[in-house]
Image (cartoon, rainbow, N blue to C red):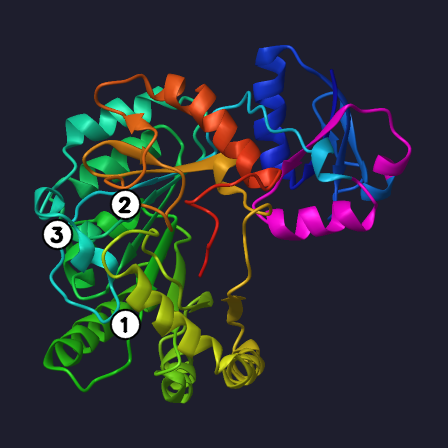
Amino acid sequence: MNLAVYGSLGLAVHVLDGLSKARHSVACVVDNSKRVGTKIYDYTVEPVERLKTCNYDKIIIATLDYMDAVDTLLSLNIDYLNIFCDVVWQPFFLQLEPTTKCNLACNNCTRVALPSKRKAVDLTFEQFITIIDKFTDLKRLQLQGLGEPILNKNILQMLKYAKQKAINTSITTNGSLLDEAIDNGIVNYLDKLIVSLDLDANTSYNKKREHNTVQALNRIINGNRTHGLKLVYNFVITGENITQMNDLVTFCTKYKPDELHIQFVENWLIPGQDGFSTMNEYVKKAKEKQGSILQKVSKCKESLTNYGINVTYTAPIERKGKCWWPFFGLFISCDGLVTPCCIRMHPEFFNFGSAYTQDLIDIWFSDQYCEFRKSVVYNYSNNICELCPQ
């Protein structure tokens, strides 16, 4: 079978490694960036327009900007049915939940929906090794789930182990324990540190959280980034906190990150789960203020660009048919259950199997996972992705 690989350079290399092991032939490699002419193994990167004339049976989309890539292919009159769904490479990205413990109780956090048996569970270092050692081609590891990662006493060991395997590492934290992460050396083994911001100081825990976060951020910004740590702030915008956007800009100019990511609020629960309908209504109300939110985001970008801060925004756009997760990433809960992504991460409602009782590679290449991928691309009925990100 002749395959065309379209996407980013890093993921194209990852895919080509997998294809060579599976002994697939590749017609050409194309890229939508300024990489045209670059050599990848025996292939030369060509412009996307080459897809109109080259001989191929299927196209592999190899980029995390999957939505834009699909739109580009459709603009070239390339049919969805031409997209290759039979993954023959290992995951590029793994989001692994280190704990379900948390020291805060943030508004709209789906941690409240955890069943009792999943509350206060830690991933052990031995379980971490079992998982990581299975994925020999893994490039990126995000330690994040429905808890505060720094609360897991083995987090430093985990990060050290990942770095020994040359895996890019990141965590998402509420920021309240960042001083501890600096003192214990955790930050030294991170490529990216993502800090979730909530600038509503009306609650006592937020006042404490902000004080602790600011103190630690000052330490990071003023001397704890010698190894090239990327600092990212994440802010979930809803219909209720639009007024915080001015404070957000002020905060970012004072405690400068490399990037600010603004995430439109989503329903992170699964249809049929307690609280799904309530959260759905909450998201709908937020969407009624989309115009105002976009204006605020635009002004935020304009202001922070002048300070060299990159601002990104995830809008509430339907993802089914245009999602990279099934092909390049997966989520594993701290109790070892495999789910398709970080949005639908409640394994008690849907999972592909257990990393502790089954072979992870067998799960990744299973018929169930393969059919799931086809349902995403070809828009077959799929209750998990149907309403995402509603």
Name the residue carrying label 3.
101
Which residue type carries mark 1?
Answer: Asn
Q: Is residue 216 above or below residue 329?
A: below
Q: Residue furthest right?
A: 53
Q: Is residue 75 above or below residue 356?
A: below
Q: Residue furthest top?
A: 23
Q: Which residues are magenta?
A: 50-78
Q: Is residue 380 above or below residue 277?
A: above
Asked whether, in this view, residue 344 is left or right of residue 203, the answer is right
Q: Position of residue 274 (x, y in %)?
A: 23, 57
Magenta span has 144? no
Label total for image:
3
Q: Rounded to the nearest whole Å, what is the CA distance between mark 3 and mark 1?
A: 26 Å
Question: Residue at (79%, 30%) from the top-left corner?
Answer: 44
Q: Rounded to the nearest whole Å, what is the CA distance between mark 2 and mark 3?
A: 15 Å
> Camera-side residue: 248 or 241?
241
Q: Nearer the viewer, mark 1 or mark 2?
A: 2
Q: Are marks 3 and 1 in contact (CB under 8 Å)?
A: no
Which SS class for mark 1?
A: helix
Q: Position of residue 49 (x, y in %)?
A: 86, 43
Which of the 4 image quadrants contains residue 283? bottom left
Asked whether, in this view, residue 290 is left or right of residue 197, the answer is right
Which quadrant of the figure contains the N terminus? Answer: top right
Question: Residue at (13%, 41%) from the top-left corner?
Answer: 122
Question: Of label 1 and label 2, which has the lower sequence position?
Answer: 1
